[in-house]
Amino acid sequence: MREPIPGIPTYASGGLPVPEAGARELSTAASMRVMLRMAERAMVRASDSAQIRGNTAHLLPGSIDAFQAWLDAIGRARRYVHLENYIIRDDHIGRRFRDLLAERARDGIKVRVLYDWIGCWATPNRFWKPLRDAGAEVRAFAPPSLTDPLNFIRRDHRKVVAVDGEWASVSGMCIGDEWAGDPAAGIPAWRDTGVEFRGPVAAVIDRAFCKTWMTAGGVLPPDEIPDPAAVAPVGSTSVRVVEGEPGRSRIYRISQFVSVGVEQRLWITDPYFVLPPAMAEALASAARDGVDVRVLVPAYNNWPIVGGMSRAGYRPLLDAGVRLFEWEGPMIHAKTAVADGFWSRVGSSNLNLASLLGNWELDVAVTDLNFAAEMEALFLRDLESSVEVSLVNSARVPGIGIRERRAVERVIAPDAEDELSPTRAAARDARQRSFRGSQVSRFLGRLARAATVLGRALVGQRTVGREDTGWVTVWAVYLLTLSGVGFFFPRVTAWPMALLTLLLALAAVVRIVSNREPPGDLSKDSQSVRRS
């Protein structure tokens, strides 16, 4: 072996200098700092949002807790209240919020309410009259329009309450008796999760409301557009506000980033779990790499069609080692995630394409060990009222199928041990007293599941398991019938298509003639906020 020449660095076989021990340690430390900066930069670019420091975060582990926190905050408002929600019903809890908001408006507090037009389709116009009469401003997001005929696809799905630019809450719950329950009648509330903040992040959340308010055509005075830099720090929690907007896919990107970077565990709760292929592969890849990936979904979905589509995606995830659980109680509507006991997400985004790509959503990513510990404890508590769905091996049941002990699915392998849990039994009893949907909706849910399985099978993404054979056959017969109608009665299919294309053409002409510009927003100010 040749002796090293003094003053000349020693090179490895690859041609690079070999640093001495001390230099190697410094190099490793510097590399770690670079990697941390790269990770933070990737988070910022994926979410289009920097971390906001100096806050307090308080978990609201149930819809009843969240409603009380919202009502309390509205009651102590000194200057203004901003409320934005997908659904505000004309029922007991809806009228309770309306009456309190009207009272505060009469007290001189500026009150602005933004609701989604489709989400509140069943709420009559007379419901809003007491609010308007009291001086509050109420707006509907994206009502029908001839100039924007496809605007109904993009909904305002956010759930936000902001008060005085100093307090704000984000959650997955709408304002309706489903979430409040009726203890006097023995009707339990749906399970949902929210979080309340104080500190600079409350102003950032409030500014997110300001953007959607202006998108809906509203105008805000400067004193209702808070400056986060003017809000004094009140705690040590860092929060990232992820503003979902149509086509921006911010929560989609940050969710993928977390999924591919998580080291030990990733626990997700989602009510309408219809993963896009890229997100499904991210979770599957993490599970194959040894990460404890768990997903909790409702056993009885309030939208059985979505529930059916969700179950159609079980098999590839189970094959990869993802653990799937179905909540046995009343509808679980929470949209949360917690990773490695450090990073948590709470908000309005569901893990499906409508939320990830099409809607206006709002989520918060909290970086805090204590908050994440609360989130994990809540998840484990929910698992006590859940049943795990698993692939059945051939030793238990001939062939390979999915064990699904649902009333809407065929029982393949009943598990008697599940009946021994008092917590699970109580959850099932509560579900019996809650809204469960109609037989028609459940039938449509089965069809939706079969359609999803068939679509994936036709493009080669999966096989048709024996648990889906019957309903996929129903779809095959339906498609054959529809093709026969098209061949022998072409006008039946041609006229609807002609009407649709005519409406789109007229909308295009109106848009060209009107030459309207999109509503103003706070994008320029938002950039300065993110850099601060």
Image: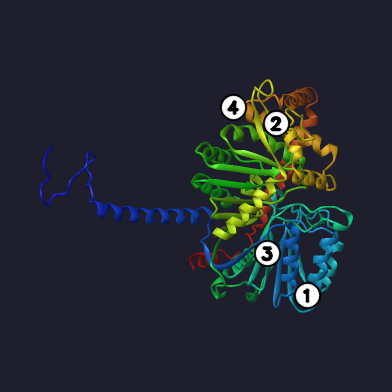
Disc number placed over residue 213 in the picture, else none: 3
Residue 105: horizontal and vertical position, in percent? 78, 75
Q: Disc 4 to disc 1, how far (Cα)?
A: 58 Å
What kind of residue is marked 1?
Ala
The answer to whether the residue labelled 4 contacts the one labelled 2, judged by CB atoms less than 8 Å apart, is no
Cβ atoms at labels 2 and 3 below 8 Å apart = no
The residue that mark 1 highlights is 105
Q: Pick whichever of labels 3 and 1 is earlier in the sequence.
A: 1
Please report contact status of discs 3 and 4: CB closer than 8 Å, yes or no.
no
Q: Disc 3 and disc 1: Cα gap in Å?
A: 18 Å
Coordinates of residue 159 in the picture (x, y in percent): 69, 59
Amino acid at circle 4 = Gly
Return the residue at label 4.
460
Label 1: state its secondary structure: helix
Query: Whole-percent x and y of residue 387?
Result: 70, 39
Q: Please, is residue 271 above or below residue 480 in the view?
A: below
Q: Which residue is mark 2?
A: 403
